Image (cartoon, rainbow, N blue to C red):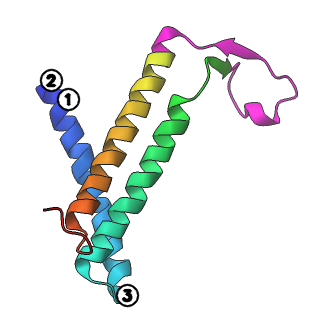
Amino acid sequence: MAAAARRFGLMLLVLGVGTAIPSLLIGLLAGASVSRALSLGWYIVGCILLIGGFFVGNRGPARPQGEGWAIFSLKRWTRWATPEEQRESISLSALLVILGFVLILCGAAVDSRNQLI
């Protein structure tokens, strides 16, 4: 559990800092305050992660057969996903949703328009 918590914290740190730097640069160019730029960046990335988690989690049990670009294939063969693939899909969905929710909470905590207490 400690290793998983460390990996999750590292992902959150990379996402948070990776979002904060471009947000601050864009915010400074637009003339926004630091708190507003950070909160908007974290809101946007958090919402994108939530939407991505929703779509990954709603993927059905059928998978394309074979390798390559199945969209352009004339043959549309599918196979059932293995239990491991289904677990991986649900786990990735949960990870994206949790990361997105935490980033939105960070944005809400930094947002100067609303007071939390």
Helix, strand or loop under label 1? helix
Q: Residue at x 21, y 44 (%)?
A: 10
Considering the numbered disc 2 on the image, is that residue within a helix, a strand or a loop?
loop
Q: Is residue 55 above or below residue 17?
A: above
Q: Position of residue 113 (x, y in %)?
A: 27, 75
Say if mark 1 contacts mark 3, CB within 8 Å: no
The residue type indicated by label 1 comes to: Ala
Q: What residue is rendered at 82% in x and 30% in y? A: 73
Q: Position of residue 20 (x, y in %)?
A: 28, 66
Q: Tell me if mark 3 has few (under 14), some (14-19) or many (20+) residues whose alpha carbon lies within 10 angstroms of its own.
A: few
Q: Earlier in the sequence, mark 2 or mark 3?
A: 2
The residue beneath circle 2 is 1
Q: Nearer the viewer, residue 71 or 109?
A: 109
Magenta segment: does it hold 71? yes
Q: Residue at x 23, y 74 (%)?
A: 112
* Residue named by callout 1: 4
The type of residue carrying mark 3 is: Leu
Is 12 magenta? The answer is no
Q: Which residue is mark 3?
A: 29
Residue 89 position, x and y percent, is 48, 25
Decide which of tag 1 and tag 3 comes sooner along the chain: 1
The answer to whether mark 2 and mark 1 are in CB contact below 8 A is yes
